[in-house]
Image: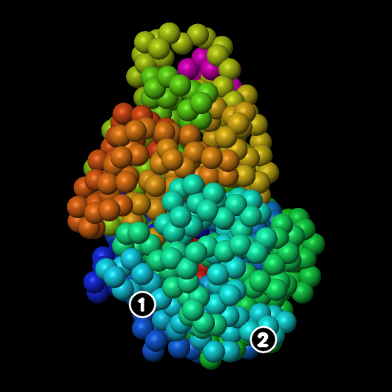
Amino acid sequence: MKPIRTRTARAIAVAIVAGSLTLTACSGSDNGGGKESDAKSQKDAAEQQDPVVYGDAAASTGPAKDVAGAKPGGFINVYMQSDLSHMDPGQIYVSDAGQFSNLIHRGLTNYQEDAEGNLTVVGDIATDAGQSSEGGKVWTYKLKDGIKDEDGNPITSADVRHTIERLYSKVIFDGPTFVQSWLSGNDYRKALPDGPYKGKHLPDTVLETPDDKTVVFKFNQPRPDLPQALAMAGYSIVPAKQDTKAKYDKAPAALGPYKIAEYKPGKSMKLVKNDQWDPKTDAVRHQYVDGWNFSSTVSQPSQTKRLISDQGEAKNAIQFTDSVDPAQMADVVTNAETKKRTIAGYQPYVWQLTFNLDRIKDKKVRDAITYAIPNQSMVQADGGRYGGEVAGGLLAPTLPGFDATYDPFGKLKKPNGDPEKAKELLKEAGFKEGTKITYAYSNTPRGQAQQVILKDALEKLGFDVQSKEIDRASFYEQVGKLNNPYDLYMTGWGQDWPSPSTVITPVYDGELVADGASNYSHINDKQVNELIQKALTQEPEEAAKTWEQAHHRIVEEINPAAPVYYSKQLQLYGSNIGGARYSTESSYINITDLYLKQP
């Protein structure tokens, strides 16, 4: 799932389908207030591991189950710190755009979530979650009747083919690559370098559309996770008639319940009802409100202040993917009335300090920095116990089989670091006082606060720290460049679905070192690569052991990214918002069920 702000999250558990196979609380004071038991714990994270099931045609038939007490009408105000990273589905792999996607886009599959957070993969524009054959190597999808884009054009299998094939072109550089690489290998772009734009297509031996209603994916090995992969926002449908290539990112065509009425880049956006969306075809979404007013210039502190006050337009407002401002956390959680207007949950993200291995080549230096990180202080800058917990490894507590005792750098015993150990390692490495090191960070309150903490810790080791601030909206694009000029950067990652394969493969597979890829450290270790390939061909029980072996080698023997903390979520909303709850699927406020109590 891409990074946190990250790339989109699925805080869910392993898929169990016939024929196939998104932590101990640290002690110490914080600014959260309230009782220790108020904060989400690893027990809560484990409860988010309920198995995902694949739904049949009945489960995939709309309309979605009504939300109790829901009323139609009105506009919800959406507070954001910066603009969406992308709106073109093929480019969507971070959490803000993923949240937005469910309002205007639709894919072959989607996640249906009940009131308890249990998840079922259902057909979205498809009639079900998919029919597998040949031991899971072939997946067939039938399209529902009545699916149209916002201009009334019927969606056919040709549009699905176009959606997949355009991902092979250079037009797309920042989205998920699971399905493409499964179909055509890691060098998938070579199979169709111009995408569908010059009239060429993938062969029917890979992707077949025998009629207007049928799509068949054909793989060289079982792909039991395909329904979950296709549920990612990055695989939402782009109608062939509407595709404007690079320009599509600023003006996508809607298939979902809402469409873009007005967009002012960097400032605001207005969504209104899409009258071509038929609720009878949609088992997931609702269209309660008349529309959504996005403001992308509201800082995290300002969002929190407005929502605490609960006056005027703030009564109808939500935080989209931002959290409660850490500095105002106590004002929220110690006030019973305000705290009633929060949603909370354990996210599938791990924040890590990523090393650019092309620039920091000495493992002893990387280890020294890892030991020196004051992890608990970093958590404090993100809301204390309501914002996260010190991490021992790179796999989140929301993943099945999470090992809470894994802590090779001793962070649970020394949550604010071990500078003496760090200095010993630097001495062994022949470190020279005053060595320059460049740290890139996002221009968010959290990023700015953590920059101060890290800079102080590194300067105490003798580094000359050059801090470089990057705009939040383009942060991952900038650090995703192979020749980026940074030594260090904080990145967050959460599973796309509940398997280590969706963490270790995209972030640590050496075959995926490329511009725009998610291997931010540029790790390319032969043994790790071999373990990844081995795990991908194994049954889940065997694979779990192989993934653990790969994880241990990555953390202990290579250290491309220092684990910092596991992320939690606490969001605030206005008193007139109805249907608000934590979404297990998105790890944010559940966007599809919201309504206004008094429209």
Mark 2, secondary structure of its residue: loop
Q: Quickly name the residue at label 1.
A: 131
Query: Which of the 4 image quadrants contains residue 161?
Result: bottom right
Any part of residue 562 in sight = yes
Residue 257 falls left or right of residue 514: right
Quarter of the image for the C terminus: give it: bottom right
Residue type, numbered disc 1? Gln
In the rendering, at what x and y percent does residue 33 appear?
Answer: 45, 52
Residue 451, relative to residue 17: is it above or below? Answer: above
In the rendering, at what x and y percent does residue 118 appear?
Answer: 36, 73
Q: Is residue 464 magenta?
A: yes
Q: Quickly name the residue at label 2.
A: 276
Residue 390 falls left or right of residue 293: left
**Which residue is pictured at 39% across the width and 47% down the height?**
505
Q: Residues within 10 Å of mark 1 (few under 14, many from 20)?
A: some
Q: Give the mark nearer the N terminus: 1 vs 2.
A: 1
Q: Is residue 183 magenta?
A: no
- Mark 1 and mark 2 in contact? Answer it, CB < 8 Å: no
Q: Which residues fall within the magenta stretch?
A: 460-465
| Foreground residue among 335 and 91 | 91
**Which residue is pictured at 50% across the width and 8% down the height?**
432
Residue type, numbered disc 2? Gln
